[in-house]
Amino acid sequence: MKKILSLFMIIALLFSVAACSSDDKASSDNKKENVTISYASWSLGTEKEQNLERLMIKAFEKKYPNIKVKIDESINPTDWNGTLAAAASAGKMPDVFALPQIPSSLSNDWLMDITKMTEKDKDFANIPEAVRESATYNDKVYAVPFAQHFLGYLVNKDLFNEANLDYPEFGFSLEEYTKSIKEVTNINKGVAGTNHAFSVTDWYPAAANPDMGWYTVQDGQYSLDSKEFIAGANLAKEITTNNYAYESLPDDLKANFKGENPEEVWMNGQVAVKWDGTWGVPALVENGTFDFDFIGLPGGRTGVTNDFVGISKTSKHAEEAFLFSKWMSFGKEGFMKRMEIAEKEGKALNTLPVNADPEILDEYFAINEVPGIKTAYDNLDNAVVEPVKTVPGYVDARWEAPTGVKVGEEANAKVAVILDNVIKGNLKIEDYAKQLDQLADQKSKEASEALKDK
């Protein structure tokens, strides 16, 4: 009898220990530290608008009730880097913030090394390798790929059909690009072949030569004195000076079009082939009055551009900041919720999936209404990445570096001024290509050297 009582006492003790352990765990779960993280982004709209980004923040706070997200309004979209620098100096950096360029933020010592957090994250592993690498410097990850967009051309099929012409489709050639723009243009009837030609110099080299990158840059080296770049600059000049592009038309010819600005003219169905990003597609789906498609770049290529966010090096809540960044961007659960909210609230999806998980892609393309975007996604192996946000020195090489060349009243014109004047027909690219190439390589080398110790 004593043995039986002892056995019952042992069993009771075990249950008591287990119950205490369970209660302790429940108590621990209920006592997660309440934290507040700050977030700055130019994509949040206003509180009144309650756009998709703000709805995603609310969903995150509901999912993780111990984490409060405070929107930092002090970072000004018109001077993003300047106000970030002021916040850094004051010791008030947002925990998570949108990045215009990763290299400049890295050189300013603003970014936390998040390599260890990304190494153990299964969703991060589902981001395409090229995108992961673009956020990696000296084998360390410093940014979160936040959103993905395609760059390329949208085609107004109706304008080609009305002119009894074949409209260009994904995979169109450089020759077809040029021919279609020229043939469909009818300025007197208010039809422009394209919106502008100022991006041709950026994408043309990669479309003409698969071994070249955007604006020719490949592995930090430029080829601006190449035949491909020179041909692209001259094509852009031809389109502009022969009035095939709406935005460069003189005012008397613009009078043939309806609209106060280029976007209105496009939406009114008077531009045949428009340079744009996929961020422009939702407005077309909702308000467009013509049949359209996304056709990418000549040669079956697509420009890919990613938005990134960084986590402040001074953040006291790094794990929570990473969890939030993941929810808003590459996390499977977060992106599935993004699609759910968009459908429920009638909001247009404002990004392509960053995560290549098959379930995400199936759901996304089940609700996406533009066939060409699916075709472009299926051909991502042939994509070319726009380097603005990721390549050290690119902003100087493409726009900001002074050239020492006098153009008009500018004694020391920047690269962008030289190229704009080439495209407008005021300068010859052949006279400046070698100088631009050397300058770009110099800026690339300087910027890369500056990051070696990071």
Image: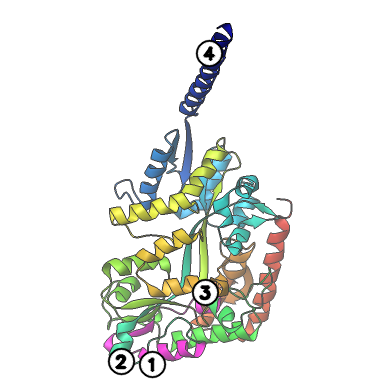
The answer to whether the residue labelled 2 contacts the one labelled 1, judged by CB atoms less than 8 Å apart, is yes
Q: Could you give the CA–CA distance between mark 1 and mark 3, rounded to whole angstroms?
A: 28 Å
Q: Residues within 10 Å of mark 1 (few under 14, many from 20)?
A: few
Q: Which residue lies under the disc numbered 4?
A: 8
Vertical position of residue 444 compared to residue 210: above or below: above
- In screen coordinates, is 319 left or right of 156? right
**Residue 87: percent from the left, percent from the top?**
53, 42
| Crowd class of label 3 (few under 14; some 14 to 19; many from 20; radius 10 Å) | few
Numbered circle sitting on residue 108: none
| Vertical relation: 351 (above or below) 218 | above
- Marks 4/3: CA–CA distance: 68 Å
Q: Residue at x 71, y 62 (%)?
A: 446
Q: Which residue is mark 1?
A: 183
Amino acid type indicated by mark 1:
Glu
| Amino acid type, mark 2 | Ala
208, 90: nearer the viewer: 208
Q: Nearer the viewer, mark 1 or mark 3?
A: 3
Q: Mark 3 — residue?
A: 379
Q: Specify which label sits upstream in the sequence, 1 or 3.
A: 1
Distance from label 4 to label 1 (Cα)? 93 Å
Q: Which residues are magenta?
A: 174-202
Q: Which residue is mark 2?
A: 163
Numbered disc 3: secondary structure: loop
Foreground mark, 4 or 1?
Answer: 4
Among all residues in the image, which is located at the extreme top?
Answer: 2
Kindly check if marks 4 and 3 are in contact, taking CB atoms under 8 A apart as contact.
no
